[in-house]
Image (cartoon, grey):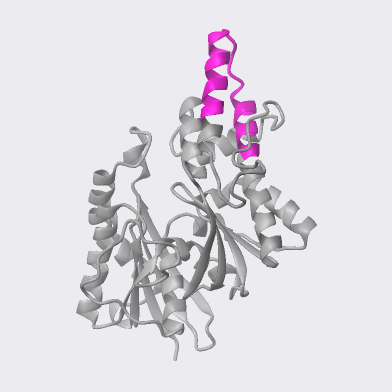
Amino acid sequence: MARIIMGIESSCDETGVGLVRLHDDGTVELLADEVASSVEQHARFGGVVPEVASRAHLEAMVPTTSRAFATAGLSMSDVDAIAVTAGPGLAGALLVGVSAAKAYATALDVPLYGVNHLAGHIAVDTLQHGPLPAPCLALLVSGGHTQLLRVDDIASSITELGSTVDDAAGEAYDKVARVLGLPYPGGPPIDKAAKNGNPSAIAFPRGMTGPRDAAFDFSFSGLKTAVARWVEGAARRGEEIPVDDVAASFQEAVADVLTAKAIRAAKEQGIDTMVISGGVAANSRLSSLAAERCAAAGIELRVPRPRLCTDNGAMIAALGAHVVAAKRPTAPLDFSANPALPVNVVSL
């Protein structure tokens, strides 16, 4: 009999509640995906303020949950299991979601699963493209994470092949946007400006691509600094800053490194399916360059639609459904959120 899984996400600045139906054949159907974002409350600070995010989650949790059930046409009594982001993320923000999930699970007397936010970004692709082939390669690119992951089983076996050693790609976008006088968060305005710019106008560096660098690790701090120094130099010379060209050249450097390393990892691992997810996966240049390079390498590319790439409850519900289907152990009611939960720990 099909089961209804509720997912709760509160790792950063989005309060997400998702509902999915887990069918007997293992397929997962999206029923509702409601999100309340506090991004506007953080914009004037140029980044997420943890205390503000936590308070926003507290205020948004019940209304967002109510909207999700209304959208799905379900009642709380229809829920068969609850999954919640246990980490990684902001400690206070995670605590709000975990506390809510424990309360709902206790009141409804249903199993509770504490799951990994990063694994959720991969699992969400199954809501659009169906079951993941095993193994597959995941390029996870978001505000706080840039990782290359080998996925042998979405419910139990994820191996990190490489990660960022400093700024994640999304962080670099936010910082470069600030330098260019563009609004926060920086991804969408840089992407928009880049469409009118020349990606070859400025030869910005490609970090960690030398022969002695770790094959699958990333670094975007140097690129961010190079952009800032270039803009400072142009300003000192009294030149008008070509925002569109700077944005396009910066974006090209990011997309070039991400896709080149991902293709190399897939080839070395003997993997012919790649999933790109996380908020930066919605970037137009990253998706187009990845499609071009994957096609040339004979690799199938899967990218969830933009709404599913950003933080949401649907991704946690999807991962929860796969964990339930795999008959993984439930989480004890006294489990704690873990802001530094490693990606290889899919569920607690």
Q: How many numbered callouts?
A: 0
In the image, which residues are magenta?
Answer: 225-253
Q: Is residue 199 above or below residue 282?
A: above
| Residue drawn at point x = 45 percent, y = 61 percent | 118
Residue at far front of view: 212
Q: Residue furthest top?
A: 238
Q: Does the magenta stretch include residue 304?
A: no
**Is-magenta flag for residue 233?**
yes
Q: Which residue is painted at 52% across and 43% down in the image?
A: 169
In-image side of 90 versus 293 (left or right)? left
Question: Which of the 4 image quadrants contains residue 268?
Answer: bottom right
Residue at 63% over, 30% down? 204
For the C terminus, the image quarter is: bottom left
In this rendering, does residue 264 appear at all? yes
Foreground pick, 95 / 168: 168
Residue 196 horizontal/vertical position (percent): 66, 31
Question: Is the N terminus in the top left, top right, bottom left or bottom right quadrant?
Answer: bottom left
Overall secondary structure of the magenta section: helix
Q: Position of residue 6 (x, y in %)?
A: 36, 73
